[in-house]
Image (cartoon, rainbow, N blue to C red):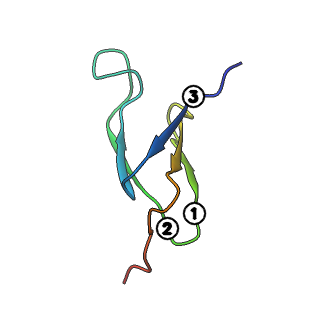
């Protein structure tokens, strides 16, 4: 099985699977400090933070 991996430049991303017609409800995922990847809990798509993007420390 091929893993669906997307490199992103933003620390907050939206995922809705394969689109509004055949995917899942849109969810917003946010990288936490120290995270380099996030996996969508619905479709298991993996989002990898691009090199050099600062996650920050939040509040």
Instruction: Return the residue nearer the eye: 57 or 52.
Output: 52
Q: Under tag 3, what secondary structure?
A: loop
Q: Are marks 2 and 1 in contact (CB under 8 Å)?
A: yes
Label 2 vs label 3: CA separation? 21 Å
Q: Position of residue 10 (x, y in %)?
A: 36, 54
Residue shown at 39% from the left, 51% from the top: 9
Q: Which residue is mark 2?
A: 32
Is 14 left or right of 39, judged from the image as shown? Answer: left
Q: Residues within 10 Å of mark 3 (few under 14, many from 20)?
A: few
Residue shown at 44% from the left, 69% from the top: 54
In the rendered view, tell whether residue 14 sits above or below residue 37.
above
Q: Under tag 1, what secondary structure?
A: loop
Q: Under tag 2, what secondary structure?
A: loop
Q: Which residue is mark 3?
A: 4
Q: Residues within 10 Å of mark 1 (few under 14, many from 20)?
A: few
Q: Residue furthest right?
A: 1
């Amino acid at each position: 099985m091929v893993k669906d991996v997307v490199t992103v430049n933003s620390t907050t991303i939206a995922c809705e699977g394969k689109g509004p017609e055949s995917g899942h409800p849109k969810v917003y995922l946010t990288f936490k400090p120290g995270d380099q990847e996030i996996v969508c809990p619905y479709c298991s798509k993996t989002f990898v933070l691009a090199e050099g993007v600062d996650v920050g420390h939040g509040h």
